[in-house]
Image (cartoon, helix red, strand yellow):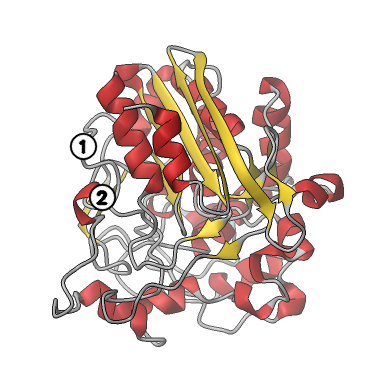
Amino acid sequence: MRLDDVFARHVGLGAAFAVHVEGELVVDLWGGVADRRTGRPWTADTPVLSYSCTKAVTATVALLLVERGLFELATPVAALWPEFAAQGVTVEHLLTHQAGLPVIEEQVPVEEYGDQAAIAARLARQSPLWEPGSAHGYHALTYGFLIGEVVRRVTGKSVGDLVAAEIAGPLGLDLWLGAPDDVIARAARLSAGPRPDPSRARATTPLVAAAPLSEASPPAEAAPLSEAEEAARDPYSLMNRALGNPGVHRLKGGANHPDLLRAGWPAMGLVTTARALSGFYRALIAGEILQRDTLRDALRPRAAGRDRVLLVDTSFGLGFMLPSEGFAPFAPTAFGHAGMGGFLGLADPARGLALAYTMNEMSAAFAGGTAAWELTKAVYDAL
C-alpha cells in the first residue's frame, strides 16, 4: 500500500500529511485547495487552524513550567490564582480533564473573545460539576482558558508567548498560538465537508476525537443512536455546552475569522503545518523540549474510562490523549491529540514515530473523519 495513494483518496478539499521516523522526515505530502472561494492551492508551507491538536502543545508548556519548579502538579489552582473559587482543583486536574469545569455557564460575548483573562474570570467564579479528581470529562474549550490563566499568573506571559519562545522559535517550527497577520493571510480556510446522507448517518455533529478504523463504515440505516450521538444532537447536552461557549459560530466565517486566529485560544487555536506538528512530536520524543523523565511521567494514564462529556471511553495522561476507543486503538504505545473535524498529531516513542495530518474540509460525521487514521494505520503497516 502506497501512502501517497491513500493520501490522494482522502485529500478532499486540501490536506497535508507528514511523518518522521527516528528523527528523519520520511513522508511529506500535501495537495488540493487551501481556499475553496479563490482556488488558492495548498502548498508545502500552508498552515491551518488545527483545533484540539493545540491541547498537546499547551500541556507541554505547562510541563515545562513544572520542570522549572514554578508550580507542581499537586499545587492547588487557587494558590496560583487567588480569585479561583473552586477548592480542591489542582494543576493536575486541569491537565487531565478532571477539574469538573468543562462548561462556561455564562455566555461569553463576542467582544471578549480576544481577552482570555476575562473569559478565565468567568470560570473562576464557578463551582465544579463533579468532585475534582473523581471523574473526567473533556474540557473542550475551558481546558485552554484554565491552564492559560495559570500560566499567565505564574509567568506574566500567555501560552502563545511561551510556545513562540520555548518551542517554535528554538526548533524553527511553523507553530503559532496567536497567528500574526501574514500567517493568517496564507492560512488554509476551513470549510464544511459534504453532509452525510441523513438516512445513513446517525448524527452530524463532529466529535473531538477521531473515529477508530473499526467505525469507518457507515452504520446500517436502522442502527439505534448511541448515547453519545444522542447528546451530539441535543443542544442542551453537556457535550454541546462544552463545545459551544465561546461559540465560534457567532463569528463571521466561524473559525476562519482573523480575530479568532489572532486570539490563540490554548485549547483549539494552534495554527500550524502538518510538517511542523509532526516536527513538534519528533522533538518531544527526542528529549528536545521536555526532559525524558517528564514526558514518561506525562504519558502515565491519569484518567481513563467513560468520559462525562463525550460519553465514550477516553484516556488521558497529562494533557495527552492515550490509546482508547477514540484515539489510536491499534497503537498501544502511542500518544498525542486529535482535533475536531479530522486533525491529528501523534507520536510513538517505541517506534521512533511522529506524524501529523491537517486539512481544511471538516468532517461532518459524528466521530470525525477517518482519513488521518487510515493514513496512520498505513504507516504502522509499513513499519
**Cβ–Cβ under 8 Å for marks 2 and 1:** yes
Q: Is residue 150 above or below residue 282?
A: below
- Image point (85%, 50%), residue name: 181
Which SS class for mark 2? loop
Q: Is residue 187 above or below residue 26?
A: below
The answer to whether residue 154 is left or right of residue 336 is right
- Which residue was labeled with disc 2? 212
Indicate the position of residue 297 as horizontal and vertical percent values: 34, 29
Q: CA distance from mark 2 to mark 1?
A: 8 Å
Which quadrant of the figure contains the N terminus?
Answer: top left
The answer to whether residue 289 is left or right of residue 218 is right
Indicate the position of residue 190 as horizontal and vertical percent values: 62, 60
Indicate the position of residue 218 as horizontal and vertical percent values: 24, 64
The label on residue 157 is none
Q: Earlier in the sequence, mark 2 or mark 1?
A: 2
- Which residue was labeled with disc 1? 330
Q: To which quarter of the image does residue 207 belong?
A: bottom left
Which residue type does callout 2 highlight? Pro
* Residue neighbourhood size for the residue with mark 1, other residues' Cα within 10 Å, grouped as few (<14), some (14–19), many (≥20): some
Q: To which quarter of the image does residue 57 belong?
A: top right
**Identity of the residue furthest to the right in this view:** 182
Q: Is residue 29 above or below residue 305?
A: above
- Image point (70%, 42%), residue name: 176
Which SS class for mark 1? loop
- Image point (31%, 66%), residue name: 310
